[in-house]
Image (spheres, coloured by chain):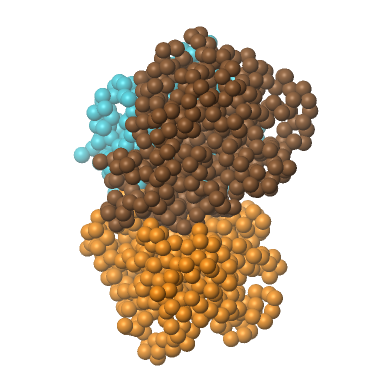
Amino acid sequence: MYELIFDREKCARCKSIPCMTKCQYIKLDTVTAKKEWQKVLDGEDSFILEACTTCYACNEYCPHGNNPFYMIVDRQEKKGILPSPRPIITMWVNQCEPVGKFTVGLLQEKALSYCFLAHFNVLAHGKLFEDLEYSAVYGQEFFCNAVYLHYAKTSLIKERLPKIIENIRKQGIKELVCLHDECYATYTSLAPAYGIEVPFHPIHYYDYLIEKLKALKDKVKPLGLKVAYQRNCSTRLIPEVDKSLDELFNLIGVERAVRKYDRKNALCCAEIIRMAKGPELADELQKKNLDDMQSVKPDYVVFNCPACWDSLATKVAERGMKPIHVIDLCRLAVGEEQSLNLEKMEAEV
Amino acid sequence: MKRYQSQIHRCFRCGYCKFPTDYSAYNCPAYSRFRFDTYSTGGRLWLIYAWLKGEVPWSEHLAEILYTCTTCKNCVEQCPMKFAPEIVDWIIEARSDMVEQGKIPARVKRFLESVYNYGNPLKKTAAERLPWTKGLKKYKEGTQYLLFLGCLASYEEATREMVENCVKALDEAGVSYGTLGDDETCCGNEVYAMGEMELSKQLAEKNISKFKELGVKSVITLCPHGYNIMKNQYQNMGYPFEVLHYSQVLAKHADEIARKVEGEVKGKKVTYHDPCYLGRHNKLYETPRKAIAAHNGFELVEMPRNRRDAFCCGGGSGNFINDYLAGSKDSPARIRVREAAETGAGILAVACPGCLIMLKEAVKTENLEDRLQVMDLATVIAKSK
Amino acid sequence: MIDIYNELTSIVDKDFVSNKPEELYIYGRDPGLMPAHEPEYVVMPSTVEEVQAIVRLANREKIAIVPKGGGLSLTGLVIPQKGGILLDMKKMDRIIEINEKGSYALIEGGTTHGALKSHLLKNYPHLRHSIPDSPPIATVVANAVIHGQGRLTQQRGFNSDMVCGLEVVLPTGEVCKIGTSAVSDYWFSKGAPLPDLSSLFFGWCGTTGIITKMAVKLYPCKKLRDVMLFLTDRAELVPDIMLKLGRTEMIEDLVVTAQPIPLRYAGNYYILFYITGDSEEELEYKRKYCWHTLWEYFEKRDGGFVSLVPEMKAPLLSMPSKDTTRFADVSKGGGFEYSGPIAPIEKYAVYVKKLEELAVKYNLYYSSAARMIDGGHSMMFSFSYTFNRADAQTMKRAKQALDEAAEYALDNGGVMWKPNLDEQKITIRKMDPNTLELMTRIKKLLDPNGIMNPGNWEVL
């Protein structure tokens, strides 16, 4: 069975334990932080395990690459702590269970992963995806499963993820372009942390787009736009891709507005938090985040994760700002139109 | 076994198929006309299943119930079930079983025999084509577009203005085009919808071989029914070509055509009737509207039922000739012209020769002639001069 | 021998009279599981006078009459058990009046819920009626006649409680006004302050008369509406959760769903409820209030709210809900039926257990929707099973499961809603004999020739 690879020595040597002291949701001084963290490591009860909002950020704050967040999740599960109500967890466990209802396109060795998110069916078209448009996989069978980190369900990840990886391998895929940021995090951070082998080469779609845009250089028109970026939880597991995003923005002539809640100080989209901790905290976080976005007067609010999109895009629009996905922003730069728009609620009257 | 036989029992007869999206009226043309549940899509599907099981024997009445369906696809839009896209195909397949068994109602039989013998449903010889169509240039290699007139435009006098104005608009647009002349034969769309698949295929093959012989690359059809079968079936028969409905050409060249508009026609309200085979069948809702809107002076007003909710004129599936839905104030064409008149529009714009014939006739029957003029898009544009 | 067909065509336009096998076939069955039985004639009257003439003809000839709306009870209530004349009422579909200040709509007997909803939305967007989740072809009258429930039932009771006047053609042919309209020009009450005669026509399965006009109450339609979804995996908590929400007096409709597919439903009870408001502030206040009303379950991790994305909300906010109808094709067989007792909400957990047990026993897909009625005085609990119309075996099994569910519900505090003939029989068996005697006397008095939907509510 897979076990978390974790070096307790690194923690023992760590003086400032930024994983705890930088937490945006739990306010701790260094002494308490050290004490509580030790309890976590020792498998003792610590209020941290209950209070954690599962924002993933501590993984990024750790200067030693020691994955403290995975440790928290591990301990939560061992202690039977429910970060969200049990029925919510049950719903997540059931709805993503692979039951043979997946979609596989005309696959090449290089393929796109839509994960289990229909948004990409809309997004992944046009010039930027010309060669790979039909080389894609979608469905529970290709779902990265990292979401269970929010629900103290490492056991489920350990059970399902190797099968998902095997599903991908069986398709003959050698390079997997992960359109869902969290997939990339899964294959490059989560899987290795548990010693789960990944037999294909994961590519973050930012890097894919950089390549594409460079190839289409003549067709790219710098947009000259200022954007507010909504940084999502899974980027905390792969902080290196943030640099790719800067490069990407640079290529399409977009200025990433300096705002309070971006980069290391980013705020969670808060819908998982709403279900886990209640509406007050979620509303407060969203208000802070939206106020901050508004204060920089962005031309667009840019989303990376479709889940953030679902949580915040409507609210962004209600405040008179324009939500857009990173892929669509790049599509604008090559003269195409925004494809992922807010659904009108008129549907079934 | 045909697919419908293994699927048709899935209809629950919930009745969503009778309505438009907002439930404001009945939107199934046959149900609106006859009002017995037998004439709604649900009733029809249950009767077909009963016929398959031997619970209801074939009768002229049963067959007529099947052929009152105009294949307008309102039911396909409204049915909440996963099989919704297939419903009309099931009805057509059931008809094809009736055709194969020789069990079809009299008017359908006459229609098909005429197409078989004459290449059109109107029992006309090529020599009897209307004079203004005879004068059109013939397609020769290198011509940009083949203009496919279709049976109604070739033989029905009521379409005269439509043909003349379409041609004029094409001239103004500066595109080159030609017709097949005496060699044009029925497109086969209605024949297909009536379940005579074999004949439909033969017609398609005949037309395609002409296209091939002449090296046709692009076809403009006047009729959405022809557009539909060429777009969705001819394409799969080994000779791919571009198909355009004339409304697309009007919209594309609106600037050239518009520039020649001289007179002001301000305040003229136009309402547009979506033909089923352009709208629900091929999702072309905005293009025809753009074709009118591009011209100054028109105010486009919508009928309550428009676009995906448009109410069929009752002419589809050969009913512009067979007219199984005629004979009542609840005949679809009559309901539709009343709806158009209520918008206050003076012009009811259509984009299909079938709708044109059906609705013109209905305007007369409803005594709306001094309030409402039915004309096709090209004529609407031409009248603005 | 009298030619009834010709008599009928002398009353009603012949286009709307049929004795052809096709119409008889379709009008002889419904989408549920009760056996078919065909009428001899199908007629679509357009006026009260036509209805009267048909009723008089039927009395003279001692031939059965069955009035029909959308025909969607699923329990075979308009299957003409004794043949005769089936009256499809849907041509009498005028919306006669919306009395804006009196907050009621006066409609004809065949007006559909779809049409009334659409009319109000277009012309009186600040008013609404209690629309059921049956498809929009369901008629307002027939739905009230069977004591249907709708989107306002949680707040206002059965849809029949929201009726405020009737015009009825009695089984003997007289036209009779019921309620204030019998005295006044206004249709504001179906009974009070007069003796309430309206109850002679609700719950009788069409055996006591034909409703040709009806007034229904309209209620405020707030500008905004939202849906909230609370999950719990413990059935025994459901009644208290329902009550707590109901007692906030802030929620509109409340329905609890239990079903194994799609998978996200498995293992949980889905408590869906609606809130309305004239401003975002009002809505937000109610949203928070409801959250905190259920805080104890949330804190104990026994229940939680699901954040719904717009695509999930749209179908939930639609009225009627197409999802209810979609259940018919879950097993790709085009059929479902439910046994629907009205029951104390405290029975939720045992009913749901029975629901699941029967699904296993008969190997069927199941679903249940429990709608809270009148703030929690009762609920409608559906034992709902799908079947395949092309597979006689599944149909048989589904019928057995439904019969067993009905027996169980009746033994456990429930009373069958819109009961099919079998359920009517077991209801009669359990009924206070004096009540039954009173029902029988009333029926005899109103319908001496026994022509109205015979077979229903009959002591065998």
Judge left or right: residue C242 versus residue A316: left
Look at 45% across and 12% down and name the residue there.
Answer: B214
> Horizontal placement of C197 versus B97: left or right?
right
Q: Residue furthest bottom?
A: C434
Chain C drawing hue: orange
- Nearest the viewer among C435 and A141 is C435
Percent position of residue B275, x then y: 55, 37
Q: Residue furthest top?
A: B142
- Quadrant of the frame with the N terminus of chain A: top left
| Place of residue C93 in the rendered image (x, y in percent of width and height, measured from the top left) | 57, 62
**C299, A143: nearer the viewer:** A143
Q: Is residue C211 visible?
A: no
- Residue occupying image coordinates x 27% and y 53%: B53
Q: Residue C176: name its quadrant.
A: bottom right
Let me know if residue B213 appears in the view. Answer: yes
Q: Is residue C435 left or right of residue C115?
A: left
**Is residue A311 positioned above or below C260 on the image?**
above
Q: Colour of chain A?
A: cyan
Chain the render paints brown: B
Report x, y in % for residue C314: 51, 48
| Residue located 46% across and 39% down the image | B317
Q: Point out residue B380 in the picture as x, y percentages from the top left corner.
A: 68, 30
